[in-house]
């Protein structure tokens, strides 16, 4: 086990017309002092790096940037949890005109999606959309520790299949900046106390 084959060369070129296999009973170290490449040129093939032993991990380390690029699809699949952590910003961007970003969960009970952005009272969740469409199968609750404001520039409505309560602890202002303030009931009476 202590026998050594030591090859020193200015340039080392190994060509194999068939398969090449390297098996080691210990560690394998490939190190280069310049840009390095491990490629396959045959169509419809893949390169597989596996850490298949029980409890084995696979680490990709870079002192600079780490890039994973593909001219077609890039997929990351985990048999359990997937965690992405960054010391600074995280950006998800699609650049095609029909590009779509989906967050899909199959969770059937309890919290399924959690956005935690309240490290400080000044922390902001900012949503910019051409059209914003929110559909909720069950209840909808919005609680604000400060002012709650809803503004629109077109005819708008709030409709419920039940009693609708509008309450102000110190007052209630109904204003029409132009036109008529119309209060009517199609069925039942109007009671103003």
Image (cartoon, grey):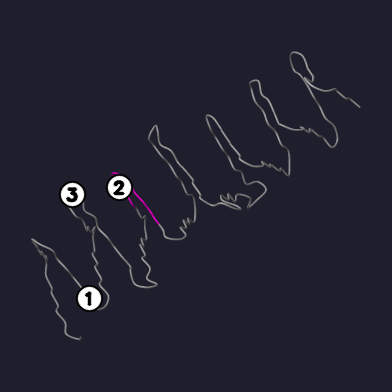
The local secondary structure at tag 2 comes to loop
Principal SS element in the magenta part?
A: loop
Write down the residue under mark 1.
Answer: 24
Give neighbour class at mark 3: few <14, some 14-19, many 20+ (Cα, 10 Å): few
The magenta region covers 68-77
In the image, 110 versus 78, the foreground residue is 110
Q: Are marks 2 and 3 in contact (CB under 8 Å)?
A: no
Write down the residue under mark 3.
Answer: 43
Q: From the viewer's perspective, is residue 171 above or below residue 74? A: above
Which residue appears farthest toward the bottom when viewing the image? 2
Write down the residue under mark 2.
Answer: 70
Q: From the viewer's perspective, is residue 193 above or below residue 144? A: above
**Does residue 150 show up magenta in the picture?**
no
> Residue at the spot x=29%, y=63% of the render?
49
In the image, 58 versus 118, the foreground residue is 58
How far apart, in angstroms, are the residues tagged by discs 1 and 3?
29 Å
Residue 33 position by quadrant: bottom left
Which residue appears farthest toward the front when viewing the image? 187
The local secondary structure at tag 3 comes to loop
Residue 69 numbered tag: none
The local secondary structure at tag 1 comes to loop
Q: Is residue 149 left or right of residue 84?
A: right
> Residue at the spot x=13%, y=73% of the render?
8
How far apart, in angstroms, are the residues tagged by discs 1 and 2?
31 Å
> Residue at the spot x=21%, y=50% of the render?
44
Q: Is residue 44 left or right of residue 89?
A: left
Q: Mark 2 or mark 3: which comes first in sequence?
A: 3
């Amino acid at each position: 086990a202590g026998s050594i084959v030591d090859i020193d060369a200015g340039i080392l070129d190994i060509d194999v017309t068939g398969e090449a296999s390297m098996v080691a009973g210990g560690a394998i170290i490939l190190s280069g002092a310049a840009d390095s490449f491990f490629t396959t040129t045959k169509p419809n093939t893949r390169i597989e790096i596996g850490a298949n032993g029980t409890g084995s991990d696979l680490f990709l380390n870079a002192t600079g940037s780490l890039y994973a690029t593909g001219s077609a699809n890039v997929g990351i699949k985990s048999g359990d949890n997937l965690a992405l952590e960054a010391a600074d910003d995280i950006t998800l961007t699609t650049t095609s005109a029909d590009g779509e970003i989906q967050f899909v969960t199959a969770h059937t009970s309890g919290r399924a999606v959690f956005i935690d952005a309240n490290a400080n009272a000044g922390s902001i969740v900012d949503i910019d959309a051409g059209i914003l469409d929110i559909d909720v199968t069950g209840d909808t609750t919005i609680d604000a520790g400060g002012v709650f404001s809803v503004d629109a520039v077109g005819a708008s409505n709030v409709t419920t299949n039940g009693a609708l309560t509008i309450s102000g602890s110190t007052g209630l202002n109904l204003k029409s900046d132009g036109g008529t303030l119309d209060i009517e009931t199609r069925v039942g009476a109007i009671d103003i106390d």
